[in-house]
Image (cartoon, grey):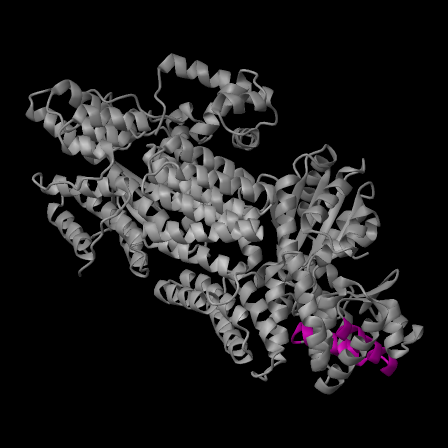
Amino acid sequence: MIELVERASQLSELAALLAEATAGHGHVAFIGGEAGIGKSALVETFCHAHAEARVLSGACDSLSTPRPLGPLLDMARQTRGPLQRLLSSSSARESIFTALLDELAGVPQPTVLIFEDVHWSDEATLDLLRFLARRLGPLPVLVVATYRDDEVGHRHPLRLLLGDLATTRTVHRLSLPALSLEAVRVLAHGSVLDAAALHRRTAGNPFFVVEALATGDEGIPATVRDAILTRAARLSEPARDALEAAAVLGFRVETTLLTSLLGAREAALDECVGVGFLRAEGAVFSFRHELARQAVHDAISPRRRADLHRLALENLRTTSDDPDGLARLAHHAEMAGDREAVLAYAPAAAKRAVELKAHREATEQYARALRWTSDCRSLERAPLLEGFADHCQLTDRHAEAVGAWNEALEIRRRQGDRRKEGEILRLLARPLWYLGRSREAETSVRAALRVLEPLPPGPELGWTFSELGRLAMTSGQRDAALAWSEKAIGLAEQLGDQGLMAHALNNIGSTKLDYADERGFDDLERSLLVALAANLEDYAGRTYTNLASTAFDICQLPRAERWLEDGLTYTLDHDVETYRLCLTSQLPMLHLRQGRWTEAADEATALLSRPDLSPLYRLRALTTLGQVRARRGDPETWTALDEALALADLDVDLARSGAVQVARVEAALLASDRRRAEAELHALNIAGFEPPNPWAAGELALWRWRLDPLAKPPANIAEPYAQRIAGDWAGAAASWEALGCPYEAAEALADRKDEATLRRALAEFERLGARPMAALVTRRLHELGARGFARGPRPTTRANPAWLTSREMETWRLLAEGLRNAEIADRLSVSTKTIDHHVSAVLAKLGVRSRVEAAKALTVLDVDLRSEKLAQPN
Amino acid sequence: MARYLVERSFPPGLGIPVNEEGAASVLGVVGRNAEHGVTWIHSYVSDDKQKTFCVYDGPNPEAIRRAAYCNELPIDKITKVTVLDPYFYR
């Protein structure tokens, strides 16, 4: 056991978390620090000090392509129960994750789950960590994950996971600092080395310090590597051979493998252990530190290294037939330069990764196989290219996907496989669309149609119909979209293809709704039911997104809100991250319309802080943020709107760029800059933006009317806009109020030139915080000779102490009345799961543990409110 | 980070007592601002104490609003500003 110095506070923090876990409140602790800072030592010391807990540990390896769910495999071996059985029988990921939860809940003692070195983690393990973080609340578990924070850059998947979990209350971050001079002095006690010089050279890195001290009297080595190699040089030859073999095999090596690999004798291995390079842990030898392994590995001559990998490969092949050993075999095969082995194992490793939804790893294995089939004419390359391209899309590597599809296309054409040719042409469209090359995408799908039509009908043709429908829908061609999608449905019914059915129904519904035909909702709901029944999680996610956005596009806000909430809950439960993000990106726009500007701005800002955010979502978030600022009269309105416009220019999809322009017209008018408003409107006219959607058309018509009262509006615009343009201010205001849009309602009232109505408008603008409109209305009131406007009650923290959203406030009140979650859900017409989330958020934000405490907090608040008649904030 | 000028009105007149209580309330404001990444530089107060002009450093207007809200302070107008000093051009 290593003696730790200067780690008392981290140990006590972990102890506190374990105490909470023991009481039934699970937590996750991420421990970050540079290599050699002592993360593993900390974890080990902690576990030794808390023998009452059950410890399950697993490590991520530094193989170029990690084994999917590697750490979980290690843990399963330690539990030996249903979990291990499920893992070895290639089951679906969901059942594996659930089995883990059962395993954790099934034992009375608290469990410590250790994930080491998660900066090397595969995608499936990151998903597992996310899954655990969100579900650990009621379990007696402490998850401890260590990582090298200096290797986790801006776009590293772990950074993104930590960002996602930033607001999760059960997740904690600890970091380990370098040792101080005092600490180094303590460690160097009794050595001839000068503590101050040692501290300087090692920069307080504990591993380096210990290694340097171990090299003893030869002076302080220049680098960690030197320290390690110096010590390795002192080993006897058999011991050094054994060490090199171990270094090639990996951080943890099975004893049997090591001995059969070199006939390595006990004595040689004992020597390595004695000197401190290796540790014996039952059936496994492990390096004392990855840095040591790395240094030894890199120092082996390339030829010997290749030989060792070849030996490892031969040994592993015969001794293990475990599907999760495929990644390891593929790794050794590549390092040994064995083409045949790579092509045998890499594609199989890819398939296993696909099963576990470790998409990044699947892509890497395909890429590895491709590296070894550089003969472009070879037929075996085609399925590898196709697998690679398919997975590139799932990992946002769209440009590489296009390249791979094109290459595969060449091969299939030469082969004369028309069906495959057609399928690839259709599949090419998706990454092209994501890259903003919409015209090429359309060309590709049309080419697919030409190729597939003469052949007997099959799923490829059906999907091509549906894809054509989708493209027509996004470019506003209603009849074409409906026609193509109907053809797809016909074929789907014939073939019994549920996924195709759901996809095509989705297109039809969305298209109908785009033209304000509310029967479209029926199609979308049918599509959702098909997807939910067939457990097609991605389709369900996509349909929730469509339902929410189409409801929003026709200003049916309560419906949109319901679909958003249900969708967010579903995608959270089923870990469908892509659509969860999509739904999240719609929240700001909804809240803007509802007059909930602070929420809208906060959500938009949160989205914009994600480094990987796609241009479409950035555009939406920036536009909404710009609109909030414009309506409040806040600075940096044009900063946001200019950036949004730049993003819109990238795309041929007019619908997207049109919305930004309209927002800019409004912003210019709110800033009383008529000339600018006219310029922005002119740009819109030139681009020929005439949206088919009556609401979008109405908004555009409104601004045209504001700038030119004689402009005649087009026929088909939404009623509230038509009312306002026709001068029916009362009708318009009533319509907007009925729809739940307070700002637009107040705007309509402000058209009227009588004092009472204007005062109503002013009160509403002040409540919303709409300074420019409030100022405008105040001017008009002055012109009418009115006087004396008392400011409304000031918004104050005491009305909303913990920055709760209005939904959370409502939930809080009902909770305090003693209602159970199911009853609250009923009252607010949302799902119980949604209320579960709101309740957790309320308790967390108030910093209380129980509903009773939350209710007490509300009584205190109510006393304040009643005594001062404070207003609710916007 | 940018600099913002916040105009505020206090119809009854702003009253911060020059004693421990006043100091505590002012430092409370500073602490709450820090939670939102906002730094209060200083303020200018009109003679009748009914109007203040407060200078802040902050990441964006929304953070300024959030901090003001948590401190129960009203906002009339926010303007983004940069500092101009008469001796700058020397």
Q: Residue furthest right?
A: A266
Numbered disc total: 0
Residue A59 in the image: x percent, y percent?
Answer: 72, 58
Residue nearest the observer in this picture, A750 or A713: A713
Return the x and y of residue A700 as percentages of the image width and height. Answer: 21, 43
Q: Main secondary structure of the magenta part?
A: helix
- Quadrant of residue A349 within the rendered picture: bottom right
Question: Which is more toward the observer, A420 or A263?
Answer: A420
Note whether A768 is above or below A359 in the view shown.
above
The answer to which of A536 and A354 lies nearer the viewer is A536
Image side of residue A843 versus residue B76, left or right? right
Q: Is residue A244 magenta?
A: yes
Residue A15 vertical position relative to residue A37 in the rendered view, above or below = above
- Residue A556 position within the rendered picture, expressed as x and y whole percent measured from the top left: 36, 33
Residue sitting at the far bottom: A303
Q: Is residue A180 visible?
A: no
**Quarter-of-image position of residue B73:** top left
Q: Residue at x 20, y 46 (%)?
A: A665
**Residue A6 vs residue A477: left or right?**
right
Position in image of residue A555 (x %, y %) = 33, 35
- Report the span colored magenta: A222-249
Position of residue A673 in the picture relative to residue A22 (left or right): left
Residue A223 visible: yes
Q: Image quadrant for the C terminus of chain A?
A: top left
Q: Is residue B44 magenta?
A: no
Query: What is the quadrant of the N terminus of chain A in the image?
Result: bottom right
Q: Nearer the viewer, residue A859 or A755?
A: A755
